[in-house]
Amino acid sequence: MSETRATTSVYPPGRYGRRRQPGRRWSLPLVLAAIVCGVVAIGVSWAYYQKFGQTDYSPEIVGWNEPTDAQMVIKFRVRVPVGETASCMLRARDYQGYEVGTRAVQVPARAGGGEVEVTESVPTTARGSVGDVMSCQPVG
């Protein structure tokens, strides 16, 4: 009895179409197109981050004190660019969510720019329960 071992499959010629060669080659135009698309995507991402990412004048509530019937003291942080001043609108609300007091405050930038921590009181018409910074924007 004799045994023959084949190392590769043998197919009848013309029956299964053209066989692919192992190790597909990447063509130069395809590689260049992928690189260009990647660079464009990074550029667009960077432009949108600069426009909408880390915005100046973005407030963050730190907290507030135990309010009285006449006022609520709100503590917050706001990022102000060097040489600029932010105008922030503060609001106090009662337990039902109704507005019981508002106040606009101006926050100058600190010497090196960046975040400024501010504590301001808001006069109220009734006892408040929640303090908000509704918005901060450049003065002018």
Image (cartoon, helix red, strand yellow):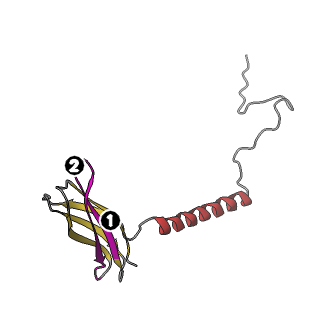
Q: Quadrant of residue 112?
A: bottom left
Q: Position of residue 34 (x, y in %)?
A: 65, 58
**Is disc 1 placed on a helix, strand or loop?**
strand
Residue 108 versus residue 46 in the image, above or below? below
Compute the Cα span from label 1 to label 2. Answer: 23 Å
Question: Can you tell which quarter of the image residue 19 is in?
Answer: top right
Disc 2 element: loop
Report the front residue among 133 and 41: 133
Q: Which of the labelled discs sits on residue 95, or is there none?
A: 2
Left or right position of 56 against 111: right
Magenta portion: prevailing SS class: strand
Q: Magenta span has 108? A: yes
Query: In the rendered structure, which amino acid carries the disc numbered 1?
Result: Pro
Residue drawn at (32%, 78%), measured in percent from left and top? 113
Labels 1 & 2 near each other (Cβ < 8 A): no
Depth check: 108 or 22 in front? Answer: 108
In the rendered image, the quadrant that contains the C terminus is: bottom left
Using the rendered view, name the quadrant where residue 33 is placed.
bottom right
Judging by the rendered image, the residue that carries numbered circle 1 is 59
Of marks 1 and 2, the one in the foreground = 2
**Quarter placement of the N terminus:** top right
Taking the magenta stretch, the answer to whether it contains residue 88 is yes
Residue 50, horizontal then vertical, whole percent: 48, 69
Residue 96 tag number: none
